[in-house]
Amino acid sequence: MKKNHLLAAIAFIFIAHIFLYHQISVVGAIYISDENGVLENLQVLILFISMLIFLIASIYSKKRDRAVLFSGALLCLTFLLREVDVEDLDVWQIFIFLGSGAGRNVFLSVLWLMMFVVVWKDFSYYRALFVRLLFAMPGGLFVTGGILLLAGSLFDNNVFDVKFYRLYEELLEMNGYYFILLSSIATSYFLYDIRSKDNL
């Protein structure tokens, strides 16, 4: 992922915020931050696209690198099931069981345990790769997303006594997921680049 592409993506964030500010302050569309509102639906869309990017990239990646991409996809799935009220959807009962409540917790725990076992078997390799990613563009984008999500959780827990705390929470979460989306793209490019250089 080139720097000019990253700058364009970040510029898009600012343009989107200008639009949202106009909708809220001028039009008075505070409803966009409601439960299952516009911002939450955007978050779900962003997470779903991020998960797809990680999964698609895994098809074309080196076998040993797939655990990194699968971990990214699994993280997106974890956030996705946190944002979506699966129990309210008109889907098969098995999906409701796996996507909500105790069933969701068990389902995700099993997937993360499987991922941990894969990484543990070749720990030295994945540790070096994760460190390499962390100090490159993918890691910077991912950490930024994490910080924004943590900031959003502060408003969710009413740490700050502000009028539109729900709006700030949803905006920060949307931005956090957007940076994770950028990280998924950057990770795919990064792994492709380093493997191309290794094959020279």
Image (cartoon, rainbow, N blue to C red):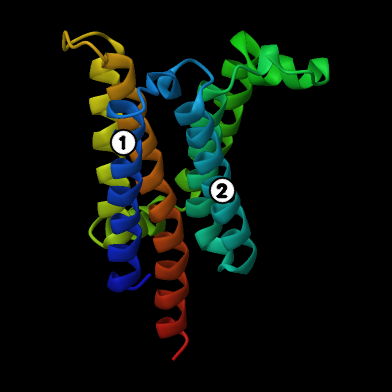
- Nearest the camera: 121 or 43? 43
Q: Which residue is mark 1?
A: 22
Q: Is residue 130 left or right of residue 41?
A: left
Residue 88 bears which disc, if any?
A: none
> Badge 2, how many Cα within 10 Å: few under 14, some, many 20+?
some
Q: Check disc 2 and report its element: helix, strand or loop.
A: helix
Task: Please say if 58 is above or below 179.
Answer: below
Task: Please say if 194 is above or below 47.
Answer: below
Q: Position of residue 114 (x, y in %)?
A: 58, 36
Q: Is residue 58 left or right of residue 122?
A: right
Q: Position of residue 158 (x, y in %)?
A: 24, 8
Q: Which residue is mark 2?
A: 49
> Badge 1, how many Cα within 10 Å: few under 14, some, many 20+?
few
Residue at 57 percent across and 62 percent down: it is 57
On-image quarter of the N terminus: bottom left
Q: Position of residue 196 (x, y in %)?
A: 46, 82
Quadrant housing residue 154: top left
Residue at 81 percent across and 15 percent down: it is 93
Residue at 29 percent across and 57 percent down: it is 11
Q: Is residue 73 visible?
A: yes
Three-letter code for the amino acid on which mark 1 is drawn:
His
**Mark toward the start of the polypeptide (1 vs 2):** 1
Q: CA distance from mark 1 to mark 2?
A: 27 Å
Q: Check disc 1 and report its element: helix, strand or loop.
A: helix
Three-letter code for the amino acid on which mark 2 is drawn:
Ile
Of tags 1 and 2, which is closer to the observer?
1
Direction right: furthest residue: 92
